[in-house]
Each structure stands twice: as structure tokens, then as C-alpha cells.
Image: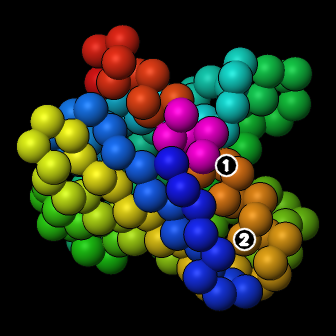
Amino acid sequence: MTTQIISPTALRVERKFKASRERLFQALTNPASLEKWFAVGEGFTTPIAEVDLRTGGRYRLGMQPPDGTPVLIVGGVYQLIQPPDKLIFTWAWEAAGRDEPETLVTIELFDLGDETRVILTHEQFLTPAARDQHGEGWQGCFNRLAMAIENEEV
């Protein structure tokens, strides 16, 4: 997995997964699958996974930290849904007092035979610190996704 800083307000994460594009697209968009892997680290759970998978539809995901602190909730609107190649959606935290703008996530999936290369671009951050924090979060999520695929949970 590689994470690249492509500007002060954008990052790109690339990773290969041992799964088809169709299987990965499903893992990225199906609530039951998202519950298995969408969280930033060890011990986190995903008690909220709501998806209205259509252009203009909303999603909402909640990550529960292992220390019992409140669920971290992010949501947004699907801008483009192109199975199994591409997904574009907005990203905004629900927490009161978070001074972060809505950002944009683009996920592209490329067929490599028995693997799929995923390129995630997350942009429009207010600060490099917010960009870097999200880069670490995406790495954690992708590590969990790879484990869910390996364990055939998604």
C-alpha cells in the first residue's frame, strides 16, 4: 500500500487486493460488508452502516472506538456510481465542533486478473494535518478490508 500527498489538500492511497472488482465494489457499498471492515484500527467496530446506493443517495457510517468514547460518524452523498469501476462521494463528519469542510472521495478499481488495484483520492481538505490524519485512517480501513477479504467475510 502506498499513500501519496498529491497537494496540500489532497492525498492518494493505492493498494492491491486479492479479490475481483465486483467483490471489492460490493464491499465498498453493501452495509453488511461495510460493518465487517470500515473502521480505522484494531478494536474498532462499525455499528452504523447506512447506504442508499444511487446517485444523489446518502450514506452514513459510524466507527466505535474500543475505549467506549462516542461513535465517530461520517456521511455524505454519492456523486457517481459506476460499478465495478468507480465511486465518487462527499465526506463530512457529523461531530459538533469539528471545523472541517466537506471533502470529496474518488475510488477507482482496476482489474489485474486475480487481484484488483484500488486507487482512492481524498481531496479538498482544509489543512495538511487533516489530510494526513485521513491518510492514516484510510490505511487502517484498507488493512481491515484486506483481512475481511482474506477471511472471506466480504
The residue sitting at 21% across, 40% down in the picture is 115
Magenta region: which residues? 139-143
Q: Nearer the viewer, residue 118 or 127?
A: 118
* Disc 2 from disc 1: Cα separation: 10 Å
Residue 10 occupies quadrant: bottom right
Looking at the picture, which amino acid does disc 1 mark?
Gly
Can residue 136 be seen in this snapshot? Answer: yes
- Residue visible at 48% across and 71% down in the picture: 121
- Main SS of the magenta part reads helix
Q: What residue is at 42 percent from the left and 43 percent from the top?
A: 50
Dot 1 corresponds to which residue?
137
Instruction: Give the residue pinned by disc 2.
Output: 131
Rendered view: 112 above or below 130: above
Q: Secondary structure at mark 1?
A: helix
Viewer-nearest residue: 68 or 128: 128
Residue closest to the eye, 56 or 132: 132
User: Would residue 142 be counted in the magenta stretch?
Assistant: yes
